[in-house]
Amino acid sequence: MRIVLLGPPGSGKGTQAALVVERLGVPHISTGALLRNAAKRGTELGLQAKSIIDKGELVPDNIMSDMIEERLGRDDVAGGFVLDGYPRNLAQAKSLDIMLERLNKPADEAIHIDIDTEQIIKRIAKRAKEEGRSDDTKETVRNRMRVYAEQTAPVADYYAERGLLTRVLGDGSKEEVLQRILSILDLNTSSA
Ligand code: AMP
């Protein structure tokens, strides 16, 4: 199953992607994690990306499409994948479509996690304490939310127009949100 998981910063999409891949046995492809790893390793791309991430801006599309194309070309995506954090704007959504078409692996589902601003602020404050992400500061979060509203929210509409989008409520416990996602995917949730 090939799934695109969408949602604003702090919606829990990384957490849910990790839980969903456990059930599906497919790779979790998080562009944010790929970028943070590159920054940790100190590669040129990683260092360039870090200064952009820390401002809450988007890393340029050409860098992202090379990164995602390389990742989607690996053997472990044969059985599917959960994409987390990509696409982040309409240009990326279109380029992903072309890429997946070429690989004969079109997306099956796009899921958007809906959450209100108050919850986002609470969750990110909690994550800032637990994980210490350098882009979870107040000012950067504000910018990430603006970038999300302007550039990423239209991606959900893009998938909706193609009949691929389902929205789930992101409030409640991790397990509750997971159950909502699994039921969209028609997965047997009795063992959950
Ligand atoms: P995330 O872990 O998905 O919240 O991503 C953290 C940061 O990495 C974002 O705020 C962006 O700066 C950068 N990033 C992640 N994915 C993308 C993408 N698809 N396009 C551009 N920038 C990205």
Image (cartoon, rainbow, N blue to C red):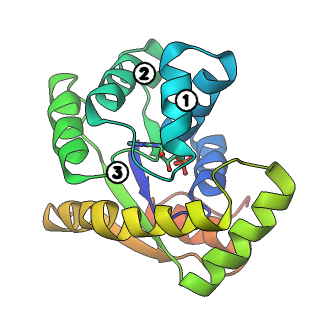
Q: Nearer the viewer, residue 1 or 10?
A: 10
Which marked residue is nearer to the observer: mark 3 or mark 2? 3
Task: Establish whether ligand 1 lies closer than 8 Å to the Cβ of label 3.
Answer: yes
**For the point 48% across and 64% down, which residue is it?**
143
Other residues around mark 1 within 10 Å, as few (<14) / some (14–19) / many (≥20)? some
Which kind of residue does numbered mark 3 sit on? Arg
Q: Amino acid at mark 1?
A: Leu
Q: Is mark 1 within 8 Å of ligand 1?
A: no
| Residue 99 appearing in the image | yes
Residue 68, given in percent of the width and then of the height, sits at: 37, 27
- Callout 2 amino acid: Arg
Report which quarter residue 121 is drawn in. Answer: bottom right
Which residue sits at x=65%, y=46%?
18
Vertically, is 76 above or below 99? above
Q: Please name the residue that numbered disc 2 is placed on.
A: 71
Quadrant position of residue 63: top left
**Residue at horizontal 39 percent and vertical 46 percent from the top:** 58
